[in-house]
Image (spheres, grey):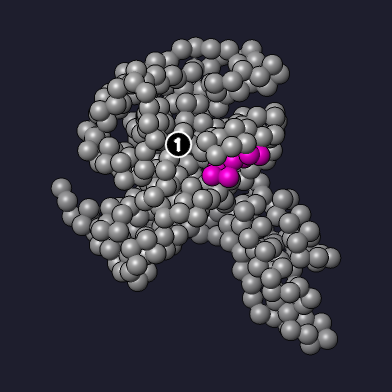
Amino acid sequence: MLRVLYLDCFSGVSGDMLLGALVELGVPVTELQQVAGAMGLDATVSAERVQRAGFAATLVRVVCSRQQHHRHLPEIEEIIRNARLDAAVAQRALAVFRRLAEAEATVHGRPIDEVHFHEVGAVDTLVDIVGVVHGIHRLGVDRVLASRVSVGGGSGEIAHGRVSIPAPGTAQLLKGVPIEGGPVEAELCTPTGAALLAELVDEFGPLPPMTLTAVGCGAGTRDFPRHPNILRAYLGAMEWAEPGEAQHIWVLECNLDDVPGELLGYAMERLLEAGALDVQVLQATGKKNRPAVLLRVLARDAEVRTLEEVLFLETGTLGLRRLRCARRTLPRRAAVVETPYGSISGKVARLPDGRERFCPEYESCRQAARRHGVPLQDVYAAARSAWEHAQREP
């Protein structure tokens, strides 16, 4: 059995909403205060029960007694590394902040270490991020799952001016995450919430079969008249397919002989953004001996309809095949290792004989290789070496 945390993001997600839900699931507010103290932050953490459109939820407030200032990534990393935190908590929190920095660097076209955090550099955001990672770790969660994320709509003010919602940095962080607009004209998903989801969630989809043990509701700051601005978190246990047990996915296929390469590449991007597990393009021969490609998409139940719509809209195909098939996977969990090239994210798979294998994440390695001007294979080797060294430590 796996201990699972499922996040119902029907009203988006933010750091304080996550903290509120975790408090209701059993994380003491006193521990969140200790997290702030461990980082040397002059902040007070409190929680109160509030109403959001008639529903009760917990609102966590982080109040700093002194004026806050903007920070760059190296300063934030130094605060976390020097803090009296559990090593696993520190590593995951560092990975969340690095995601934020990478998103901002992409949006503003600047090197990652030169990114000047605004809202994200504040004390309350430091407590939000490290506190959420600590809370999930304290609850002994093996796997974090989440629903489709409502991002809101309209426009809002950020440090760089007025932008449409989701804000540019938030949109960058939500790549690969299933999202939807609404249900209100306001920002529902914050950059902090998006970064936490992107780093901590193992899989997005509908609520899975599980034995429910607790429900927590975290309140957002705003109270909308006819929409409960809360995040619901379900804590429970579920069976996970052991090596050799079958799981089921959908295979969507279509033959294409009249689609230019640039349109095909764009269609692949759209499919991955819409939640496809994988997208493959295979060489084929079509009718009348025409050169063609076979476009194959792997999908979960929840994303099949959306992915079919993308295929019809972006490729112009008049039909497609839908096949339900079994697949076998190894149980895995997310992990972060520290290397000379910075924090590298990856997955740890449990092999049939009980051993574990660490697989570094390509994107994390690619960014580190570019940042340090070294071959990609050197980063991969350093990440695997760091994992092996960590396993040898008592």
* Residue 78 located within the stretch drawn in magenta: no
Image location (x, y in percent) of residue 188: 60, 31
Q: Is residue 299 above or below residue 60?
A: below
In this rendering, the answer to whether 16 lies above or below 323 is above
Q: Nearer the viewer, residue 255 or 314?
A: 314
Residue 300: give x, y in percent of width and height.
62, 51
Q: Is 206 placed left or right of 59 in the picture?
A: right
Magenta range:
163-170
**Residue 298 in sight here:** no
Task: Give the percent coordinates (x, y) of residue 48.
Answer: 46, 12
Residue 185's spot in the image, x, y percent? 70, 29
Q: Which residue is mark 1?
A: 118
- The residue lying at 30 percent from left, 59 percent from top is 341
Residue sitting at the far bottom: 289
Q: Residue at x 30, y 41 (%)?
A: 75
Task: Kindly identify the residue that appears in the image at 81 percent across and 65 percent down.
Answer: 316
Check the image and report above or below for 243 versus 85.
below
